[in-house]
Image: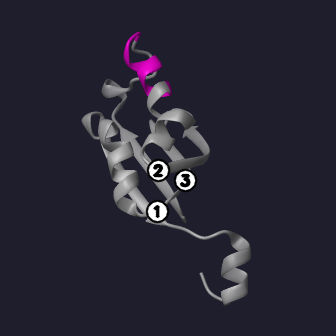
Amino acid sequence: MSLFVVQHVHEAEKCPAGDAEMGPMLLKIISDQNAANYGVTIHNEAVLDGRHTLYLTVDAEDEGKIKEFMAPFLHMGTVEIWPASPCEAVVERKEC
């Protein structure tokens, strides 16, 4: 498994949080159970207040699994996926 950081950004007009149907669906999509169906483990998630930006720190076999898992978010905005490493790993290899 490899570590990744995922960013989803959407416009305020497309914000699912306040929508009676989309809000609960969003929570189901980012549930541990749903993520596991795609081979993704979510370590944490956070939304930047007022910025309509979601960050996830996840483990997955490869980026393709994350793309499949995050596909519903593409209907609302953008998704970016970056390979990442724990701080301990970058110190051991002596570079970011």
Q: Secondary structure at mark 1?
A: loop
Name the quarter where the C terminus is drawn: bottom right
Number of the front mark, 2 or 3: 2
Q: Which residues are magenta?
A: 20-27
Q: Residue at x 38, y 44 (%)?
A: 69
Q: Secondary structure at mark 2?
A: loop
How far apart in space, not on screen, are marks 3 and 1 (Cα)? 10 Å
- From this view, report whether residue 36 is shown above or below residue 28: below
- Can residue 23 be found in the magenta stretch? yes
How far apart in space, not on screen, are marks 2 and 3 (Cα)? 10 Å
**Disc 1 residue type (three-letter):** Glu
Instruction: For the residues labelled 3 and 1, say whether their Cβ atoms are less than 8 Å apart.
Output: no
Which residue does the numbered mark 1 point to in the structure image? Answer: 61
Q: Residue at x 72, y 85 (%)?
A: 92
Q: Which mark is residue 26?
A: none
Which residue does the numbered mark 3 point to in the structure image? Answer: 58
Q: Residue at x 44, y 31 (%)?
A: 29
First in residue order: circle 2 vs circle 1? 2
Residue found at the far left of this picture: 75
Number of the front mark, 3 or 1: 1
- Can residue 75 be found in the magenta stretch? no
How many C-alpha atoms fall within 10 Å of the one at disc 3: few (<14), some, or many (≥20)?
many
Q: Secondary structure at mark 3?
A: strand
Q: Position of residue 61 (x, y in %)?
A: 46, 62
